[in-house]
Amino acid sequence: MPLTSIRAIDYMTKNPVTVTPSNSLFEAIDIMLTAKVSGATVINERREVVGVISEIDCLQAILKGTYHGEIGGSVADYMTEEVDIIGTDMDILAVAEKLIKEKRRRMPVVQNGKFIGQYSIRSILNAVKEFNLK
């Protein structure tokens, strides 16, 4: 059985770390540090992906705020709004190729316009590890 026969959706992280645009910058930092992740998908009340925020985004916000004398704000102020998303119909290698091509550690998975999980480099590596054990 080739790796291309593995459905990526079977290895999607179903409940990844998320934040909302209205979360404060410091809430987002706390959520990411507590979960030990380097970024989070930003979703609105309709479970639509509206952005992503990373540790780098947060650090840039803190530095910028320090220079201007105001540290803080909301996730909406600092998130990246252009988000690469993935559908549910890809095989594991196609997802791996997309992550590499787009230079992303994780990508939100959307079905019918709603956020349902994420693919990450770690989830792909777990799939390969499991496949190798069979």
Image (cartoon, grey):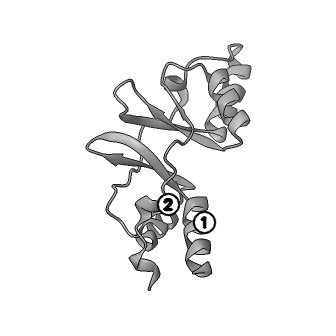
The CA distance from mark 1 to mark 2 is 8 Å
Q: Quadrant of residue 10?
A: bottom left
Q: Secondary structure at mark 2?
A: helix
What mark, if any, has residue 24 been given in the picture?
A: none
**Which badge, 1 or 2, comes first in the chain's sequence?**
2
Residue at 52%, 51% in the rendered image: 13
Quarter of the C terminus within the rendering: bottom right
Residue at 51%, 33% in the rendered image: 79
User: In the image, 30: left or right of 104?
Assistant: right
**Outermost left residue:** 112
Residue 131 in percent (x, y) is at: 55, 77
Residue at 59%, 17% in the rendered image: 73
Q: Nearer the viewer, residue 46 or 24?
A: 46
Please say if 120 is above or below 52: below
Residue 114 in percent (x, y) is at: 33, 39
Residue 80 visible, this orientation: no
**Neighbours of disc 2 within 10 Å: few (<14), some (14-19), many (20+):** some
Please say if 126 is above or below 24: below
Q: Nearer the viewer, residue 118 or 83?
A: 118
Residue 113 in percent (x, y) is at: 28, 41
Please say if 110 is above or below 51: below
Q: Secondary structure at mark 1?
A: helix
Quarter of the N terminus within the rendering: bottom left
What mark, if any, has residue 11 been given in the picture?
A: 2
User: In the image, 29: left or right of 124?
Assistant: right
The reply to whether callout 1 and callout 2 are in contact (CB within 8 Å) is: yes
Please say if 89 is above or below 46: below
Residue 122 in percent (x, y) is at: 61, 60
Q: Nearer the viewer, residue 60 or 86?
A: 86
Residue where numbered disc 1 is placed = 126
